[in-house]
Amino acid sequence: FLQLHCSLSQDTVQLADYLVTYAPFTLFPSPVPKTVFLQALALQTHYNTLVDKISQDPDFLQEALASTIAVDDFTAKLFRIHKQILKEGRSQSIVLGLNRSDYMLDQREDGSSSLKQIEINTIAASFGGLSSRTPDVHRHVLKVAGRLEESQRILDNNPAFGLTAALAKAWELYGSERAVVMFLVEETQRNIFDHRYIEHELWKRNITTMRKQFEDVCKTGSLDQDKRLFVDGREVAVVYFRNGYMPQNYSWDARLLMERSRAVKCPDISTHLAGTKKVQQVLARPGVLEKFFPDQPQVVEQIRATFAGLYTLDLGAEGDKTVTMALAAPDRFVLKPQREGGGNNIYGSEICQVLEGVKDSTERTAYILMDKICPWPVQNYLLRRDAPLKISNCLSELGIFGAYVRHGKDMVMNECVGHLLRTKSSEHSDGGVAAGVAVLDNPLLV
Ligand code: ADP
Ligand code: MG
Ligand code: MG
């Protein structure tokens, strides 16, 4: 239950800069209404299906992302690879999706809460490993505090097992004993122990893993005549991206090489694009979910119930209305660029500053606007290495892990594999655990 901290001094990582410390966590679990928790679990297989359907719909992706890729360089580069693969034809019919749909509970006037989706992460969705261990931490803390009854109510949780089952299924379908699962990782690896849980689960199933960076793929990666991917002399059955969601330190040649290959990509480029915030906003438009679930009005209703207000900033009357609305009441909204990893969104008066600068140009289409979700605050202690211990007003975000494997037209696995609760002080608007703001938690169902 650890996290690695290291800092870079100039260009070299000093040994003394490495520090292994505990992953930050709340002292006590946080209350989550049971109905809302069950609602989130029940939705997950539908979200898996939705993401998968979007990834197979090039016309939808093209239309949804057209205005974004005109101004956002990162999304445009991803999109270019996606187009290239469509032109060449996909060389692998096995699809592996490991995602995490995140929610916050919006306060209602009657004191209850309604489940609202913050986003869905289709690439590098993290904390499936560490959150497999947090239940035991809180069970122990509660026993020490003399709260045995609560200790017994901490839910079991093992996303690492389910995520691994899907990785293993994809590896098995690929069909080569020699081939490995490659974790594509960052150069500075602060969350390595989260990956390790999944690596160990794979090793338990006699599946070899290796950890490689973009640079390794650049230097040693190649395709053979059958488009099998080799990195550092090993055949790769599955590329598991735990990096590649941010523009920094990207190798576009390496990404293209992997996408072209016969290796199963988690996610493939179109599934990655399906997780963008622009796609999320387009999904909330009238009639769009119906297109993906034409014969399942109940599923449409179930999914739509979790959508917060999402607004386009495309040029035109609708986008103009969004600008006016945001400038009039910035505290009611969050302005989001097409980025991942926490710390990128814009809040409050800064929304006005940013929008004033871009409101008359196409640049505004790099963003979407979203209603701000306001959960009921709960008091707790946030334990982390570098912060003094004090009681804080806290807000929580519930994540649900989904895993699916499709082989051609057959969904061979589609499951909800666990949950994650992250909690932060209400002083912070943004930021996850990796961004140093939120800490790991467990839901205590009430
Ligand atoms: P990222 O991909 O960077 O994680 P998110 O959309 O999850 O982007 O936003 C990061 C954080 O900002 C969330 O974890 C949450 O704390 C906060 N946040 C995002 N959207 C909203 C919202 N609509 N209302 C309230 N807080 C939000
Ligand atoms: Mg994200
Ligand atoms: Mg997030």
Image (spheres, rainbow, N blue to C red):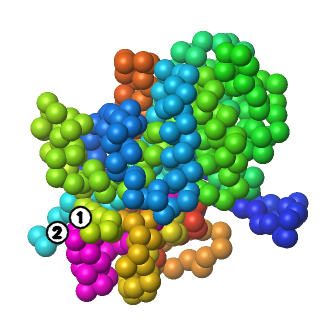
Marks 2 and 1, how far apart at CA: 15 Å
- In terms of depth relative to the viewer, which is nearer, 434 or 135? 434
Number of other residues with Cα within 10 Å of mark 2, as a class: few under 14, some 14 to 19, many 20 or more: few
* Residue at (22% x, 43% y) in the render: 289
Name the main secondary structure of what is drawn in magenta.
helix
Mark 2 near mark 1, Cβ–Cβ under 8 Å?
Answer: no
Q: Is residue 443 above or below residue 381?
A: above
Residue 392 visible in the picture? no
**Magenta stretch, residue numbers:** 317-341
* Residue at (31% x, 75% y) in the render: 333
- In terms of depth relative to the viewer, which is nearer, 91 or 296? 91
Q: Nearer the viewer, mark 2 or mark 1?
A: 1
* Residue at (76% x, 28% y) in the render: 222
Q: Position of residue 180 (x, y in %)?
A: 69, 24
Q: Amino acid at mark 2?
A: Arg
Decide if residue 126 is on the left or right side of residue 68: right
Quarter occupied by residue 263? top right
Q: Position of residue 364 (x, y in %)?
A: 40, 71
Residue bearing mark 1: 309
Residue 223: mark in rendering: none
